[in-house]
Image: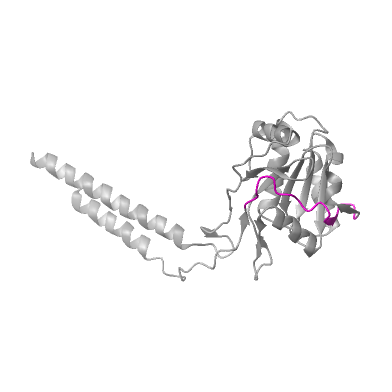
Amino acid sequence: MSPKLSVIMCLCLLLAAFAVRGAPLALPPQPVTAFAPKAGAPLPLDAVFVDENGQQLRLGALFGRVPVVLVPGYYSCRNLCSTLFEGVLQALALSGLPAGAYRLAGVSIDPADTPALAAARKQAYVAILPGGAQDLHLLSGTTAASAAFANAIGYRSSRDPTTGELAHAAGFIVASPDGRVARFFPGLRFDPAALRFAVGDAGAGRFDTSLGEQFLLLCTHFDPTSRRHSVAALWLVRVGALATLLSLGLAALARRRRRQA
């Protein structure tokens, strides 16, 4: 390829990258989300929730004997929540922890959730859990109960006024038998060995003092509803075009120098 043709191709790429002007590039305000639990923080054991059977259940009823794995989320979520819970179930299944070594509970952050929604989710989850249904509880509650739990684990979510969906972080905690935050796992997929050790440490009253990291999985690079890329994605395209222009230009210059030598 001649140097002149290389330059023309680079200019075409560059123009294409900067020609995306069909929609405004301004992003909507970033949702207010957080997940920053503190080691040793007490959970609201007196908060009353409703389980998947519609029975009232005081949060403290889950504690006292073994560590408790608590997964915040909501049951009508169409994005992260089911993926998160399945990640927790898979890690528990591979951890080598025997049935009865822990209890597992999903705690809804959405007061609009109902026992019927929780029951439907539980049917899908039970087959993965080593101990079966007896080790799994899916709780929903009032605004006050959900807020008390969220505040105790440093959890904040915000509702999209257009879709009604909640923007939230992904992760879960392991709590000690006396109802205190012992370990925080951010993300969607988890190391089974690390989870096994965390449950053992929580049972022995050992807490992870390095808590506080946040893992916010919010899709801001691509809007699947409008099928348009955000500012960040567009600038990635533009930077790629500039890099291509630079590399091709240097290659053309090197070839010219070799011919002149």
Taking the spot 79% from the left edge, 40% from the top edge, the residue there is 177
Q: In the figure, residue 207 lies in which quadrant? A: top right
Against 221, residue 61 (above or below) is above
Is the C terminus in the top left, top right, bottom left or bottom right quadrant?
Answer: top left
Q: Quadrant of residue 149?
A: bottom right
Would you say residue 74 is visible in this rendering?
no
How is the structure coloured here? one colour
Report x, y in % for residue 116: 85, 56
Provide the residue span drawn in magenta.
Answer: 36-54
Q: How many discs appear?
A: 0
What residue is at 81 percent from the left and 50 percent from the top? Answer: 138
Tell me which residue sits at (84%, 54%) in the image: 46
Q: Is residue 193 above or below residue 51?
A: above
Residue 186 position within the rendered picture, expressed as x and y whole percent measured from the top left = 62, 45
- Horizontal side, residue 251 vs residue 134: left or right: left
- Which residue is outermost to the left? 261
Residue toward you, 196 or 201: 201
Q: Residue at x 58, y 48 (%)?
A: 213
Magenta region includes residue 5 = no
Q: Is residue 130 above or below residue 119?
A: above
Q: Nearer the viewer, residue 108 or 247?
A: 108
x%, y% of residue 132? 84, 37
Q: Position of residue 134 (x, y in %)?
A: 87, 40
Magenta residues, dominant SS class = loop
Residue 73 visible in the displayed image: yes
Q: Is residue 50 magenta?
A: yes
Along the line of sight, the residue nearer the viewer: 194 or 203: 203
Q: Quadrant of residue 94?
A: top right
